[in-house]
Each structure stands twice: as structure tokens, then as C-alpha cells.
Amino acid sequence: MTLTGRWAALVLTALGLSLCANFVWLGFQVSRSVGPGPQPPSAERLISLGGAALPKPLRAEIAAALAPRRDDLKTAFRQMRDARLAVLQAMRADPLDPADLEAAFADLRRRLDEVAAIGEAAVVQGLQHVSPEIRSQIEASGKPKATVRKDN
């Protein structure tokens, strides 16, 4: 049995679309297996997530305040990650040494305080450069207030 005319064109079109879909699927699978694995979020990404509740002009000022300290921030995040891994290693140690674990926790607290200090200084500096109207848009719920438009 041979197909001719309209049915032949329809079957060939369906086969062509199926072939294209298979190549797309195959390309997706290859790209997932060949490319680099998931990367940890960058320091800038973590900070942007934390500041998502702030009004955009304030976020821009905070980002500008953080820009000169980018290397310090990356180093502080790296040290914080290393301190967290040291805590996990102390927890897994056999036999468990409570003094080592407490020292690891103390180091982690110190590293967290360093990261927080950098971020807090940037927030203070950013707040100094925005108007009281912008600052009033910060809500306790973590969501920025909707801007009220004043028509004259």
C-alpha cells in the first residue's frame, strides 16, 4: 500500500515533526549529562534574594555600597562555608569531641557575624542615600508597599 497526495504529505509532516522533537529531546539529555553540574549560588545572588523585599531604589544603593567590597564578601562567604563544613566534620568525628564541636560552632558564629557586618554596613550606607519616602515603603511583612500615586 502506498500513500499519495494529501495523506502522504500529512504522514511526512508528522514524521518530520516527530524527528525534530526527538532531536530536541536528545539534545536536552546530552546537555544535562555533559555540562557542568549545578553551581552554588554566588554571593551576589544570595544577597539579592535577601533584599528582595526592599524597594528597588534602596536595593540599587545597597548594591552600589557592596560593589567595592565584592572580594571581601566572596572571601567571607567562602570562610563561612568552610566553617560550616568544619562543624559537620566535628559532628561526624568518632569519637565525638565536644570541645572541638564547640570551637567549630564558635568559628562559624564568628564567620556569620563577619558576613552580617558587611551586609549591615551596606544597608546603613544605602539607607543614607534614599529619601524618607523610599524608606517608608519597607514593610514589616517583608514585602515592599505598593507605591501610592499622587495626582495633582
Image: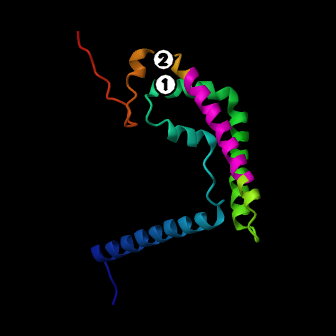
**SS at circle 1:** helix
The overriding secondary structure of the stretch rendered in magenta is: helix
The structure residue drawn at horizontal position 72% and vertical position 34%, both measured from the top left corner, is 72
Q: Check disc 2: other Cα within 10 Å, few if <14, some if 14-19, many if 20+.
A: some
Q: Quadrant of the C terminus?
A: top left
The structure residue drawn at horizontal position 42% and vertical position 21%, both measured from the top left corner, is 135
Residue 124 shown left or right of residue 2 in the figure? right
The structure residue drawn at horizontal position 37% and vertical position 37%, both measured from the top left corner, is 141
Q: How many marks?
A: 2
Of residues 8 and 40, which is closer to you in this image?
40
Residue 126 shown left or right of residue 147 in the figure? right
Q: Which quadrant holds residue 113?
A: top right
- The residue under label 2 is which amino acid type? Val
Q: Position of residue 118 (x, y in %)?
A: 64, 31
Question: Where are the magenta residues, as a range?
Answer: 103-125
Q: Position of residue 138 (x, y in %)?
A: 40, 28
Q: Which residue is mark 1?
A: 58
Residue 144 in magenta stretch: no
- The residue under label 1 is which amino acid type? Leu
Is the residue 17 above or below the residue 79 in the image? below
Q: Which residue is mark 2?
A: 130
Q: Which quadrant holds residue 18?
A: bottom left
Residue 142 shown left or right of residue 124 in the figure? left
